[in-house]
Image (cartoon, grey):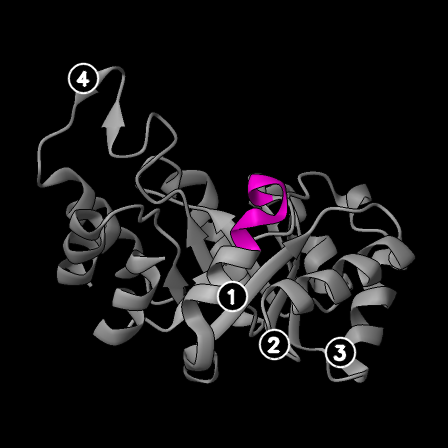
Amino acid sequence: PTVITRAVDMGINYFDTSRGYQNGQNERMVGAALGAKRKDVFLSTKCDQKTGAGILTELDTSLKELNTDHLDVWLLHMKDTPDKITDELVEAQHKAKQQGKVRFIGMSTHQLPVMVDRILETKLEVVQAQYSFASAATWGPALEKLNQAGVGLVAMKVMAKAGGRRGGGATRPPTFAPAALKWAINNPAIATTVPSMTDIDQLEQNFSAM
């Protein structure tokens, strides 16, 4: 919680969580840590249920746990094949948007290139995708296509898959994480990133890079 409150004070204004993180405890912690500062940030969470009714129930729980009356971004969690974005799920997302419970709808994925056409077909507005220097060759064209269509792009796992700030069991040099973060955000198609920040040192390092 202290990392979150410090981040808001420093000017970070995009916070990402999920209904399933820490069995629901993460949303509760984020909501408590943000407190009255909720109005000053973009707040994003993700849903895991497989039916429209299921995700709408999750949404109501998320709003309660996050102590807010709306989400800025609401994502279907970890959809890696087009068939996982069902019409039923998208219709439920649009319903929540019409009700004023969410501002923007979208999905998260680790397999962006195969998802692009379905994302555009369903008119999703935000995509949170794995993207790093290690995936640039295959992910770049997909990002550009979505960017040209006006889809908001949030990069995750920007330190690359192999161990975050540490890879292959060996400690990476201190310059690695800032360089990887800068590499991702320098792509004009990327709106923002959600690098992991679990302590004040990581927060200050990421903030310095940004």
Q: Which residue is mark 3?
A: 97
Q: Are marks 3 and 4 in contact (CB under 8 Å)?
A: no
Q: Which residue is mark 1?
A: 31
Disc with the residue nearer the chain's start (3 vs 1): 1
Is 26 contained in the magenta span?
A: yes
Which quadrant of the view contains residue 6? Answer: bottom left
Disc with the residue nearer the chain's start (3 vs 2): 2
Q: At label 2, which amino acid type do we have? A: Thr
In the current view of this chain or complex, which residue is farthest to the top? 169
Please state the extent of the stretch shown in magenta in the rendering.
21-27
Q: Residues within 10 Å of mark 1 (few under 14, many from 20)?
A: many
Mark seen at residue 150: none
Q: Where is residue 122 drawn, in percent x and y? A: 77, 64
Q: Where is residue 16 drawn, in percent x and y? A: 49, 59
In the drawing, does residue 196 fall left or right of residue 129?
left
Q: Residues within 10 Å of mark 3 (few under 14, many from 20)?
A: some
Q: Are marks 1 and 2 in contact (CB under 8 Å)?
A: yes
Mark seen at residue 68: 2
Label 2, label 4: how many angstroms apart (C-alpha)?
Answer: 41 Å
For the C terminus, which image quadrant? bottom left
Q: Where is residue 118 drawn, in percent x and y? A: 74, 54
